[in-house]
Image (tube, rainbow, N blue to C red):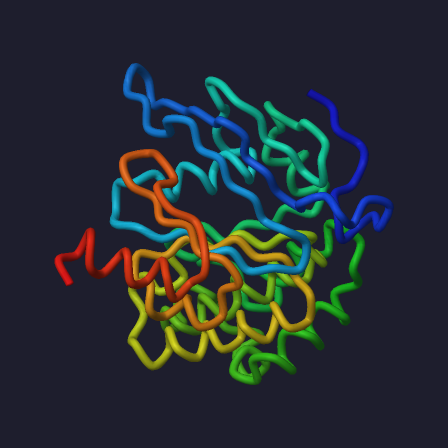
Amino acid sequence: MTVTSPVAGHDAAAPEEPVVELVGVRAAYGAIEVLKGVDLVVPVGSVVALLGPNGGGKTTTMKIVSGLMPTTAGELRLSGRNVTGITATEASRLGVCSIPEGRGVFANLTVRENLWVATGTGTPLAEVEEAAYTRFPKLGDRRNQLAGSMSGGEQQMLALSRALGTSPAVLLLDELSMGLAPMIVSQMYDIVGQLAEEGISILLAEQFARVVLPIADTAALMLGGRIVAVGDPADIEHELSTTYLGG
């Protein structure tokens, strides 16, 4: 499939369309179906939190949006356009930027070299570095350090900075809290909240609901490969804790 037109955030022609929309999406690993008709909408400039326990389908949903996994049925739409079957490269060119579970920095490259990867979309390295070091001064102190030798929190800062260097239309965050100390998790989501205030559309998947609900505009509860509830974050938190976690 070849896709050439950018999504919302890169093209203001149709701002009323959701930046991401899944319609009846199904997906499988071999004979095992893991998504069973998922409907999900991410409006432009909003933060949507995809919540639920491990194994519910959150990561697979993120892979569909980022082009890392094909659907077996349904549609993926970006700014109203059907782009079902899009590849990861095409998704990236359209402004879909993903930070996968486990951070995904290049461990054998320095901080500066990792940031250089983001320049493939045309942003000069100097601008990427300035934004990264302003947002995360620790990265400036470690610009010549190998990424794999940094702490988990610092690696997550680097992954986020590299993603922002591509000027994404939509940012996908999968389990940002994984392996991080609670204080670092709080700091990272404070940054995500600031990004949301700047107007970046964000879809985030998170097992630990309470760290993301304060910054979310909408929350969706996912269980068994289906979205079982969508609504106000406070309402979804109540349903998650009382119905599925036993209070």
Q: Quadrant of residue 235?
A: bottom left
Instruction: Using the rendered image of the protein, determine whether residue 106 is visible from the camera's viewpoint.
Output: no
Note whether 106 is above or below 40 in the view shown. Answer: below
Q: Quadrant of the N terminus?
A: top right
Residue at 50% from the left image edge and 34% from the top image edge: 64
Q: Residue 94: image x %, image y %?
A: 72, 41
Residue 161 screen position, x and y as percent: 59, 67
Q: Is residue 8 above or below residue 211?
A: above
The residue lying furthest to the top in this view is 31
Q: Is residue 176 above or below residue 61?
A: below
Q: Is residue 225 left or right of residue 163?
A: left
Rendered-image quadrant of the C terminus? bottom left
Residue 127, image x, y percentages: 76, 70
- The outermost residue toward the left is 246
How many labels were placed on the picture? Answer: 0
Residue at (34, 38) in percent of width and height? 57
* 106, 92: nearer the viewer: 92
Q: Is residue 241 left or right of residue 154?
A: left
In the foreground, 18 or 171:
18
Residue at position x 25%, y 47% in the image: 54
Q: Position of residue 181 (x, y in %)?
A: 29, 75
Residue drawn 67% across the image and 56% down it: 118
Query: 131 or 11, which is in the foreground?
Result: 11
The part of the image, by quadrant, that contains residue 214 is: bottom left
Identify which residue, 52 or 188, lies in the foreground.
Answer: 52
Q: Is residue 162 visible?
A: yes
